[in-house]
Each structure stands twice: as structure tokens, then as C-alpha cells.
């Protein structure tokens, strides 16, 4: 069974540009979560999508947005990139939105903003 | 405001000995706790979890202890093996209380465990 896949693995952008990160969940999983891991910090919750709807978002500015497609894959868009957006972005999936279920994480997209 | 804290950035133990990783939380709404392990260049993988109605949960070499009054949990690995060397994250959720925390895991900063042969 394929795990959570993320693309691209690495992404280099310049300040002010837009970045698009993609995630395919495990087959059968309907929930997708996005987390940011900046250097030296823990994982910070960004967004949760379930059945195509945004269910919750973390304390991030509106330039962080995303969507979930009918096949449950997801995109994370970061507009007007800033240097501090440089981080590892992790996507995770689960069968439902209950966080007493374990999340399955992808390997992440390393975003570098120059 | 760091609601979940892992105060030890790193821990070094000898193979065969016990590894104890600690985690403190401040939000009394948290009612479900998880530990994840992360190897370099990989995403975190689930290790073990515990509900707030329990104070201990075991899975093989891994045991998680929860002290609700102290808002403290710990992960014990016995015996430690070199393959356990990784970054360990504790995470908490307010699953039963829901609200704005529903669907959200709050992670600690992680502890780097190194097990020496």
C-alpha cells in the first residue's frame, strides 16, 4: 500500500513569489493535514481538510491556503513568500478527523525562500 | 505560547539501557496524547498513544506514562537499541473536548535520542 506522497521534495523560491505544494493521501483516507516544521521548532498545525472542506486552521496568515480535491489529494498554496516561510512542510492523512487516530505522514517538501 | 514542551533537546543512552523521554503540557483540555518518531529525510511515524482515562499504555519495548495532575507524560524505551536513534515528538489533542482544537495535534519541539552500541 502506497504511503502519503508529497511533491516536490524540494522547492526553491524567491521572496514575494507563490509556492504550491501537493499531497496524495493513503488510499481510503479522507482527511488531509498540513504541518510546518521550521528549523529547531516542533510541527505547527497549518490546515485540516476533510471531505473537500476546510475543517480547521492554525495560527497562520491568510496567505497560507489550500484545497482538497474530490480524490482527496490536497494542495497547499503560500502566497507572497517571506524568508521565514522557509521550512519543511509535512502532509498527513487519516481515515477521519478524529485526532485520536494516528496520522500517517509524508516525507515532506523542503521549501527554501531566498 | 508553547502548550506542549519537551525540555530536553537531546538524550544519549547506551544500548540495552532505558531511555526516558519527557513531555509537559499546559492546556488542561488535552485529553489524548501521542508519540511520534522521526528519522532524517522521513516523515514522523506513529509510535504509541494514551487517552487521559489511562495512566499507562504499553506496546512491546515502549511504554507511555501519563500523570494528569502534573500535566506530564513520559515515554520509556526498554531496552534501547541503536535503531531507536531518532527525533521523538510528543503530541496532544483535545479530541473529546473538541472546539477550535478539533482535528489539531499540538506537537512539542522534539528530543533527539542517540543510542550508542
Image: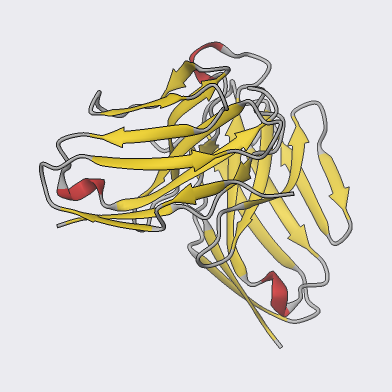
Which residue is pictured at 16% across the width and 50% down the height? A83
Residue B15 lies left or right of residue B43; in this view the side is right
Which residue is pictured at 61% across the width and 22% down the height? B94
State how many labels appear.
0
- Residue B84 lies, with reference to residue A7, above or below; the image says below
Q: Nearer the viewer, residue A29 or B13?
A: A29
> Could you say where residue B102 lies in the image, as x and y percent from the top left?
56, 18
> Could you say where residue A87 lies in the image, as x and y percent from the top left?
33, 52
> Could you say where residue B15 lies in the image, as x and y percent from the top left?
75, 82
> Could you say where residue A6 lies in the image, as x and y percent from the top left?
48, 48
Task: Identify the residue at the far front of this view.
Answer: A71
Residue B50 lies left or right of residue B42; in this view the side is right
Q: Nearer the viewer, residue B94 or A90?
A: A90
Task: Please identify the quadrant where the N terminus of chain B is shown.
Answer: top left
Which residue is pictured at 52% across the width and 51% down the height? B6
- Residue B115 lies, with reference to residue A39, above or below; the image says below
Task: Identify the residue at the far left of this view.
Answer: A16
Q: Nearer the viewer, residue B88 or A102?
A: A102
Which quarter of the figure has residue A29?
A: top right
Which quarter of the figure has residue B65?
A: top right
Task: Please identify the quadrant where the C terminus of chain B is shown.
Answer: bottom right
Amino acid at each position: 500500500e502506497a504511503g502519503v506522497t508529497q511533491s516536490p521534495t524540494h522547492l526553491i523560491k524567491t521572496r514575494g513569489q507563490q509556492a504550491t505544494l501537493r499531497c496524495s493521501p493513503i488510499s481510503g483516507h479522507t482527511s488531509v493535514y498540513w504541518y510546518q516544521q521550521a528549523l529547531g521548532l516542533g510541527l505547527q498545525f497549518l490546515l485540516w481538510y476533510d471531505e473537500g472542506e476546510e475543517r480547521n486552521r492554525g495560527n497562520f496568515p491568510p496567505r497560507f491556503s489550500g484545497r482538497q480535491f474530490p480524490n482527496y489529494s490536497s494542495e497547499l498554496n503560500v502566497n507572497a513568500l517571506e524568508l521565514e516561510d522557509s521550512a519543511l512542510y509535512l502532509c498527513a492523512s487519516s481515515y477521519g478527523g478524529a485526532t485520536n487516530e494516528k496520522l500517517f505522514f509524508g516525507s515532506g517538501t523542503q521549501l527554501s525562500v531566498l | 505560547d508553547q502548550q506542549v514542551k519537551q525540555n530536553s533537546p537531546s538524550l544519549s543512552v547506551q544500548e540495552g539501557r532505558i531511555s526516558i523521554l519527557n513531555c509537559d503540557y499546559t492546556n488542561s483540555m488535552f485529553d489524548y496524547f501521542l508519540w511520534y518518531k522521526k528519522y532524517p529525510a522521513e516523515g514522523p511515524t506513529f509510535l504509541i498513544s494514551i487517552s487521559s482515562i489511562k495512566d499507562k499504555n504499553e506496546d512491546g519495548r515502549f511504554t507511555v506514562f501519563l500523570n494528569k495532575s502534573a500535566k506530564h507524560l513520559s515515554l520509556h524505551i526498554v531496552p534501547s537499541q541503536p535503531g531507536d536513534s531518532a527525533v521523538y515528538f510528543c503530541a496532544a489533542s483535545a479530541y473529546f473536548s473538541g472546539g477550535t482544537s478539533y482535528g489539531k495535534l499540538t506537537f512539542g519541539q522534539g528530543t533527539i535520542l542517540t543510542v550508542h552500541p
